[in-house]
Amino acid sequence: MENDDLSRIELKLGDITRESVDAIVNAANESLLGGGGVDGAIHRAAGPELLAECRTLGGCPTGEARMTKGYALPAKHVIHTVGPVYRDGKHGEPALLRSAYQNSLRLAHEHGLHSIAFPAISCGIYGYPLDEAAQIAITTVAIALGRETSLRTVTFVLFNQPVFAAFERARGQLRSE
C-alpha cells in the first residue's frame, strides 16, 4: 500500500449531509426509499426530489450502487449503496461490504468525480463489527486509489467517536504494513 494513496483518505467526525464534495454515499436499504440513520438524514437534507428520483430506480441489491442528483445537499450527487446486515460473518458479509464500497467508487470514477464522502456502511443498525468494517472500508478504498481513478480525495465522515477510532486504527494498520 502506497502511503500516497493513504494520504488521500481523510477521516472526520461529523454530518455527511454537510459535505461539499462531488458525491456523498448513502448507506441505503434495498428499496432506496429512505429509512433511519444516515439514509433518513440524507433524504431529509436533500428534499423530496431525492425520493422522487429514487422511486424511478427500482431499488438496489445488497453490494450494488446507484447514483442520483444531490438536490438540496451541498454534494452534487448521492451514490446509494446497500451494505449487508451482519449475521455472523459467514454469510458473505465481508464480500458484500467490499462490493458496496467498490461499486460506489466505480460509479464515482465512471462519472469523473474527484471527491467522495462515505459513511461507515453497515455499522449502524445493520450491526457490522466496527473494526472489521473499518478494515474492509479503508483497504478497499486504498486499493482503488492505487489504481487509475478520477478520485483525488475520499473522506470518511463518521458519526461518533467509537466509529472514528475504529477507522483511525484501520488506517494506522495499513500504514504500518
Image (spheres, helix red, strand yellow):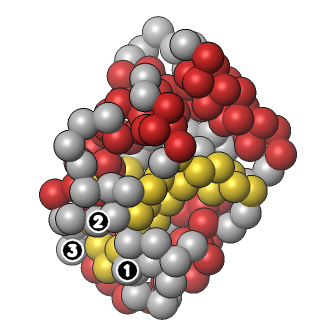
For the C terminus, the quadrant is top right
Can you give x and y, in whole percent of width and height, for residue 119 in the image? 57, 52
Q: Can residue 48 be seen in this view?
A: yes
Question: 175 left or right of 59?
Answer: right
151 or 18: nearer the eye? 151
Judging by the rendered image, the residue that carries numbered circle 3 is 56
Q: Tell me if mark 1 has few (under 14), some (14-19) or many (20+) residues whose alpha carbon lies within 10 angstroms of its own.
A: some
Residue most toward the right? 161
Q: Can residue 27 be seen in this view?
A: no
Q: Taking 168 as reference, is 44 above or below it? A: below
Q: How far apart are marks 1 and 3 (CA)?
A: 19 Å
User: Given contact means CB atoms under 8 Å apart, are the residues at marks 2 and 3 in contact?
Assistant: no
Judging by the rendered image, the residue that carries numbered circle 2 is 113
167 or 147: nearer the eye? 147
Q: Is mark 3 on a helix, strand or loop?
A: loop
Q: Earlier in the sequence, mark 1 or mark 3?
A: 3
Name the residue: 58% across, 24% down: 175
Q: Tell me if mark 2 has few (under 14), some (14-19) or many (20+) residues whose alpha carbon lies within 10 angstroms of its own.
A: many
Question: 92 left or right of 64?
Answer: right
Can you give x and y, in whole percent of width and height, for residue 159 in the image? 73, 54
Residue 116's disc is none
Q: Earlier in the sequence, mark 2 or mark 3?
A: 3
Count the marks: how many?
3
For the N terminus, the quadrant is top left
Q: What element carries label 1?
A: loop
Question: 53 left or right of 4?
Answer: left
